[in-house]
Amino acid sequence: MNKFFSDALLPKILGIVMILTLSGIALRPHRITRGFELARQAQKINFPDAARQLAALAVQLPYRADLWQQAAFAALAQQDFPAAIKYFTQAETLSPAGMLALGDAYQQNGELAAAIQTWEEFNNQFGPSEENLARLANAYRLQDNYASAITALKELSTFNLQPSNLYQLGLLLAAHNPAAAPPYLRQAAELDPGIKALTQPLAFAIQRALQRDEPAYAFLNAGQELANQNRWPLAAHAFERAVELRPDYAEAWAYLGEARQQLDPASGRDALENALELDPQSFAANTFMALYWQRQGNIEASKTYIQHAAALDPNNIPIQSYLAELVAQAGDLGAAKDFYQHIIADSPNRSLAYQAMAEFCVRYNLEIAETGLPAARQAVLLAPKDAGALDAMGQILLRLGDQLNAERFFLRSLRSDADYAPAHLHLGWLYILKDEGVQARDHLAKVLELAPNTATADHAQRLLEDYLTRKSGK
């Protein structure tokens, strides 16, 4: 692909040029010969001028239609996408590789619709191929054209049963047609057991929801699990399908509002207001509206909705903790601490209540030894195998300077749940403090894999960048 013409071909070309010269057809043989020589020299040293030289030859030798394609490949190699498009489209015909590359050039140039049109034409001219279908599936997804992406992935699976393709197909079907998703998710997990932890909960959520014979409910459950996996574009699509089927479905509108916020923090309010209008007592709608106002910086408005949600479910510790966190964000740490104490008093036998207090102390560096440590100990005593409780104890110990035992608790947390992203984050930070770079990078990279597009991942990314910057500056 990168060799535009061979030394073996050059004598033949020059021979043709001489015949044309003798017959009086070609008037500038020296310029043409010189053009080939310049193009060959430019190609040997990967000089950017190779594409221009080959294009000039294509103009002078119209019977050599292949030169336009060679010029285009040369431009593509230099990432000159407009020139590549220009040269590819000058050619009367393109080879399969040329048509694939033209689509690539369009996509790289920000012309996704033209890329899709090119790859669809590839199918018409040459028939489906694995390379082309993979490009089409990805491009359709970028357009949010899930129906076409599903069709392309299904056809792609006839070429190659790669677990990654089956998994992507299962994810798209979960958002677009949940009932069809479980077989593909299961097959993907059979071929790659490493993704079973992701496919199994999604397939289970869909199969459980299908038992109710309510399509909108199946879309809601599929969307919730996709959201749990931080696949918000797909989750939003599932919630949109749910409200299309049931415009009166308040919970689906609430989740749609949160999904839209995840994709654009300034959006989602209309969907949330619709949910609250349909059901003012919706726990999900009140909770997500509180999150919306918190993101807008309006703590008082956020507090109003979260208080309503807390009243609807007084035993919900995460919601009660969220209300306490709003008090802390308003600047009254003493009142926030008292709120956490009330949570513990209301749920004295629940590890999560003590874990919330310990994490509050870490978050605000408040009474680490006096309040945080006893709370973390009680959390572990009540749930000795809970990853969150063990991680909270590790955080407390790390703040107290006990790196040895902090590491032990972080590792215990990961033994309980190898995919608990916060423990990977805190262990990565600990290894940075110990200047154990390889282990630090491994754990922080794991956070990015497990929890993409989350605050936890953002924290891990910052730690990685800061650490690498410091190391490169030494």
Image (cartoon, rainbow, N blue to C red):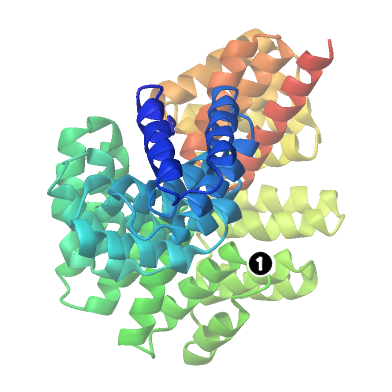
Q: Position of residue 446 (x, y in %)?
A: 50, 29
Quarter in which the N terminus is drawn: top left
* Residue plotted at (59% across, 12% down): 438
Residue matched to label 1: 265
347 in relation to 172, above or below: above
* Residue plotted at (58% across, 33% down): 34
Q: For this rendering, which residue is in front, 426 or 95?
A: 95
* Residue plotted at (53% across, 74% down): 257
Q: For this rendering, which residue is in front, 73 or 170?
A: 73
308 in relation to 191, above or below: below
Residue 390 shown left or right of residue 16 in the figure: right
Q: For this rendering, which residue is in front, 444 or 42?
A: 42
Q: Position of residue 49 (x, y in %)?
A: 64, 38
Residue 67 visible in the shown view: yes
Answer with the quarter of the image where residue 213 lies: bottom left
Quarter in which the C terminus is drawn: top right
Q: Position of residue 276 (x, y in %)?
A: 54, 85
Q: Position of residue 216 (x, y in %)?
A: 28, 78
Crowding at mark 1 (Cα within 10 Å: few <14, some 14-19, many 20+): some
Answer with the quarter of the image where residue 335 lies: bottom right
209 in relation to 466, above or below: below
Answer with the quarter of the image where residue 75 lies: top right
Tally the numbered discs. 1
Q: Amino acid at mark 1?
A: Pro
